[in-house]
Every structure is written in C-alpha cells, then in structure tokens.
Image: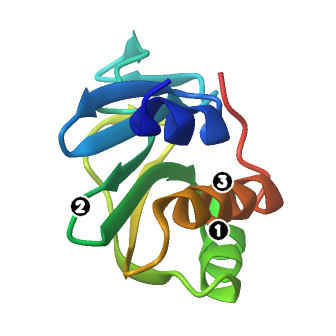
Amino acid sequence: MSTCQKLADIIGGEVVQSNPCVVMRLRDIRATILGRRTLSPLALPFMLSFEKNGLNLGESVLLEREVNPMLDALRKRGLKVTAFHNHWLFEEPRLMYMHWENVGMDPFEFAKRSFEAAREAGLKFI
C-alpha cells in the first residue's frame, strides 16, 4: 500500500493524486448552489496535501456553526489556520472554507491531528 493511500485511510478518504499526495473525503452536507443539489468535491471537501519538502496543507468546507469549534480544535493541535472565506454565491446552507498548514510535521501526524480536529468539531462525513 502506498504512503498516500495510508494517509487517505487515516481520514477514511481516497487518494486524489499521488505527487504531491492529496487525499480527500466528502463532507455530509445537503447543499445547493444556484438551487441545484451538489455533491461536487469542489463544494464539499475535507482535503489534505503532503509534499516531500515537509509542507502539509488542509482545507475543509464548514457550516457556520462548525467554524469556531474547528478553529479551536485545529489550534489546540498546533496547526496554523491561515484562511477562512467563502467560495460560492447563492448556496444553501451558507458554506465557508477553512485552510490550515504546517511545515515539518510528519504527514501521518498532520493527517491524524487534522481528522481528530474535525471529529472534535462535530464535522460529519459521507
């Protein structure tokens, strides 16, 4: 089993690409954009990437009520939250996106801490 697949297994997700390693799991959010139901990974991601130079990145869609719990849970685990913004117009419910990062942490530890934060914040997954 590849390293990237092992990282995907930590979050119960799938490998999106191998170089750099990107893993993803879809959030369980019943969302619409412009009145149309979406299951797009562009709209509903929990995504992590790992590069050989030690750069680890994370992104997740959040509901408004999940924002502060996720922020607190990531920071408690030593992960730096770097962005929080919207992606879409005319979506229901309101979808917000949080990004976090780390340099030098073992990728398995980054994946574990990221997913633990998501679970603590109450995020639901497909």
61, 80: nearer the viewer: 80
Can you give x and y, in whole percent of width and height, for residue 18 in the image? Answer: 25, 33
Q: Are marks 1 and 2 in contact (CB under 8 Å)?
A: no
Of the pair 5 and 60, the residue shown nearer to us: 5
Query: Which of marks 2 and 1 precedes in the sequence?
Result: 2
Q: Would residue 57 be found to the left or right of residue 93 on screen?
A: left
Tag 2 near tag 3, CB within 8 Å: no
| Residue under pointer 2 | 52
Q: Residue at x 31, y 56 (%)?
A: 86
Density class for disc 3 (Cα within 10 Å; few <14, some 14-19, many ≥20) is many
| Quadrant of the rendered image containing residue 27 | top right
Q: Is residue 68 above or below residue 110?
A: below
Question: Label 1 to label 2, Cα distance in Å?
Answer: 26 Å
Which of the 4 image quarters holds residue 3? top left
Image depth: mark 2 or mark 3 in front: 2
Pick the front one: 1 or 41: 1
Q: Nearer the viewer, mark 1 or mark 2?
A: 2
Q: Is residue 88 visible?
A: no
Name the residue tied to disc 1.
70
User: In the displayed structure, does residue 78 sit left or right of residue 35?
Assistant: right
> What amino acid is labelled 1 in the image?
Met
Residue 115 circle label: 3
What is the three-letter code of the residue carrying label 2? Answer: Lys
Amino acid type of the residue that numbered disc 3 sits on in the rendered structure: Phe
